[in-house]
Image (cartoon, rainbow, N blue to C red):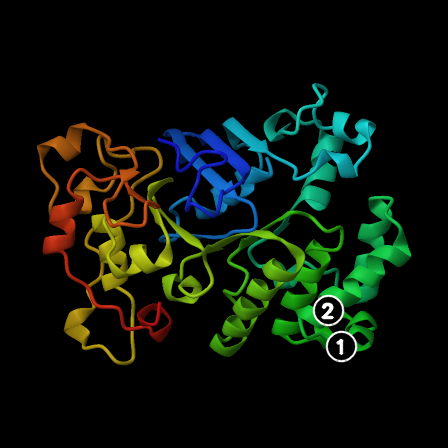
Amino acid sequence: MAIGQPQQSTTEEETRDTILEVRNARVQFGMSRGQAWVLNDVDLDIYREEILAVVGESGSGKSMFASALLDAVEDPGVLSGDVTYYPEDTGTVSSDEIETFDASGSNSVDVLDLTTSELDRLRWEEISMVFQGAMNSFNPTMKILHHFHETIRAHNAVMEERMEHVRDLFDSLHLDFERVMKSYPHELSGGMKQRALIALALVLEPDVLVMDEPTAALDLLMQRSIISMLRNLRDEFGLTIVFITHDLSLVAGLADRIGVMYAFEFIEVGKPASLLKDAAHPYTRALLRSLPSLTSDLDEMKPIAGSRPDPVNIPTGCSYHPRCPIADDRCEIEDPELVDVDDGDGDHQAACFYTDQARAELEYTLHSESMEDM
């Protein structure tokens, strides 16, 4: 079931505009013991200028979802389904440029139908990505300035215009332009390299920035600092940001929506205030209960029983039922769809037959200040 539709109203004053539409996205890898499904019939609408956080355990499919948005799944993985990108305004580019994406001239792009050269353009000029482990992405033999020049030349962009934009980005990211540009990567701290890489990803002013665990190797203070900067970048440059992470507390104050993944699909999606304070899916509630805290008692934190599913042998019915304390025979047979949860905000879905029971029986306490203050 799709999570939202294009032009779906959220309030009387506001209409949301879809920038990326994912339908029936599946990724499979052939293995000696069978087909491994690492993305399983995912449907999702991502809205223009929102910050969507995608969270879940390691191996839940988060990074594969990020790669699917850019048709960047590496061989031998096979991506199928539909990923549609909606540029904001085709009037700002020539008809020839539009036709390199879509010969019909319509204001949409079928990402999975693009040629290699068209994908190269899309991935930098429309949708850009900061990959996991990105602090090692710079060439250690090149100064930071050369990375920017190389990218700008590769896309035949106007050097002076792009570098002026980079100065604006550096200001927003609290980077000293002259110092960073003349440095080699090893001469910068981890936080500086990460911020410089964010600026590099935005050098051609894409509409969408996809970030895969961008703060995983940074200390807590720098993580919080970059989170604050991302929010400012979204507001200043009109970005849509997809933020992949395993840390729910990190994105509690950043995201407009949070999507929780389990077994290679979304099992709950909603605004932070409703999803974190009153999660509807048993897995999300278990995930929240397992979060460590300096202020909570040890008996309040419980690890999730069992282990994550094998991608070659995903359970039938609800994929979480082998680990779920309230699962019954129906859960073993039927696969629940994402449906609206009645919590008053109209933007909260969960894939569970027993959301009321989960809320009543599976307790948890929020201990992170960023969550409690929402």
Report helix, strand or loop for mark 2: helix
Report which residue position mark 2 lands on: 170
Farthest-out residue, top: 104
Q: Quadrant of residue 119?
A: top right
Q: Quadrant of residue 255?
A: bottom left
| Above/below status of 111 relative to 166 | above
Which residue is nearer to you in this view: 58 or 259? Answer: 259
Is the C terminus in the top left, top right, bottom left or bottom right quadrant?
bottom left
**Marks 1,2: beta carbons within 8 A:** yes
Amino acid type at image mark 1? Asp
Callout 1: few (<14), some (14-19), or many (20+) C-alpha neighbours within 10 Å?
few
- Tell me residue 206's x, y (percent): 69, 48
- Tell me residue 197's x, y (percent): 68, 61
Give whichever of discs 1 and 2 has the lower sequence position: 2
Which residue is nearer to you in this view: 241 or 331? Answer: 241
Amino acid type at image mark 2? Phe
Q: Residue 28, can we see it? A: no
Report which residue position mark 1 lands on: 176
Report helix, strand or loop for mark 1: loop
